[in-house]
Image (spheres, rainbow, N blue to C red):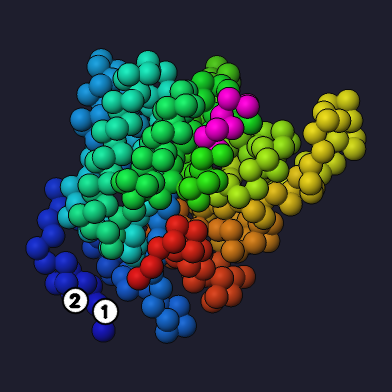
Amino acid sequence: MNTRRNFLKGAAGIIFCSCGMLDAARAQASQGQRLPVTVSGKRVKTIDVHAHCHFREALAHMGENASRILPRVKGAQQHFIVIEERLKGMDAQAIDMEVLSINPFWYRTDRDTAAKIVAIQNEKLAELCASRPDRFAAFASLALQYPDLAVEQLETAVKKLGLRGAAIGASVLDEDFSEPKFHPVWAKAEELGAVLFIHPQSVLELAKRFKGNGWLANTVGNPLATTLALQHLIFEGTLDRFPGLKIIAAHGGGYLGSYAARSDHACFVSPENCNPDIKLRKKPSEYLNQLYFDALVFTPQALRHLASQVGASQIVLGSDHPIPWEEHPVDHVLATTTLSDEEKIAILGGNAARLFGLTG
């Protein structure tokens, strides 16, 4: 019987440095899902594709701006991974494997600085994953403001370092990913079969409107930024140009999954606002079925709707760990009763394992 006593006993030798993490582990051990996760008696390998980290050696290259990089939120210091502490937190969330990523903070730096930061991060990520390949995989960092450099970094990360793809923002200094200057990066990602994880960092042009109570720059700005990124990739024909791209959109893909059908009417209602030279191969909403989305949408109702729009085969687990947006990501999926057991197994880990080519 997997009791709280047995859970804590089995974790002997793993040490927390945070009382808050210990309390969370105790709470999770006494209720809800924990490792191993089973669905209908079948062991499920749970894979969280949305988990973050930082490395002090890379931040040091930001000089006086380094202190501004970490988000001012709960769990920020846990971005600096101490392996046994991170594993304990993952166990508490019933997560077998995290695919780590670092949100871009280097897009405004010069070429040499960006190259140093990316090299450090990718090497450190590879080293971390190699130390526990059963528990960690990672997305590479890219200096996307220099597309030619990003192409080289992506090839090195995938072919030499064994990273699974790359984490990117939702734009680069307000330039959309559909701009032709970025095409070589997407071509290389398609060639390598590398997964691109789009994680937004709000919409800079709306910073003034986001001021006030409620952290609107995040709660509104982040999903809006992802929505804009995906819409440009669709409407500018980028996904037609690179049909083999493997893209995961954070936070359920922003607002697009909740209102995709409106896109299908745009060029009919206002042809003047559409480019007649861009002839999409299918309806805008249908492109969602070739993209992937994390399940970080908070409620079973929201997850039900996302699955109905994009298909359960396109959804992967995401928690934003160590930031406590979703502290029980597995329970969230299991609580969505509209999903079949097969669909739950797919979302919890099967889809990600297939997407990343993970085995075991």
- For mark 1, does the 10 Å Cα neighbourhood hold few (<14), some (14 to 19), or many (20 or more) residues? few
Question: Residue 187, image x and y in percent?
Answer: 56, 39
Magenta residues (range):
179-186
Question: Residue 35, image x and y in percent?
Answer: 31, 70
Q: Is residue 289 magenta?
A: no
User: What residue is drawn where x is 68% and y is 40%?
Assistant: 241
Q: Quadrant of residue 330?
A: bottom left
Disc number for residue 341: none
Q: Are marks 2 and 1 in contact (CB under 8 Å)?
A: yes
Q: Is the magenta stretch mostly helix, strand or loop?
A: helix
Q: In which quarter of the image is the N terminus?
A: bottom left
The residue where tag 1 is placed is 2
Q: In which quarter of the image is residue 303?
A: bottom right
Q: Is residue 264 above or below residue 9?
A: above
Q: Is residue 293 above or below residue 276?
A: below
User: What residue is drawn where x is 58% and y is 25%?
Assistant: 181
* Residue 182 seen by the camera: yes
Question: Residue 32, image x and y in percent?
Answer: 37, 69
At label 1, which amino acid type do we have? Asn
Q: Name the outermost residue toward the left.
A: 13
Question: Residue 311, image x and y in percent?
Answer: 64, 61
Q: Is mark 1 on a helix, strand or loop?
A: loop
* Residue 52 seen by the camera: no
User: What residue is drawn where x is 68% and y is 61%?
Assistant: 308
Closest to the observer, 301 or 176: 176
The residue where tag 2 is placed is 6
Q: In which quarter of the image is residue 264?
A: top right
Closest to the observer, 157 or 61: 157
Q: Is residue 211 above or below residue 80?
A: above
User: What residue is drawn where x is 37% and y is 18%?
Assistant: 111
Q: In which quarter of the image is the C terminus?
A: bottom left
At label 2, which amino acid type do we have? Asn
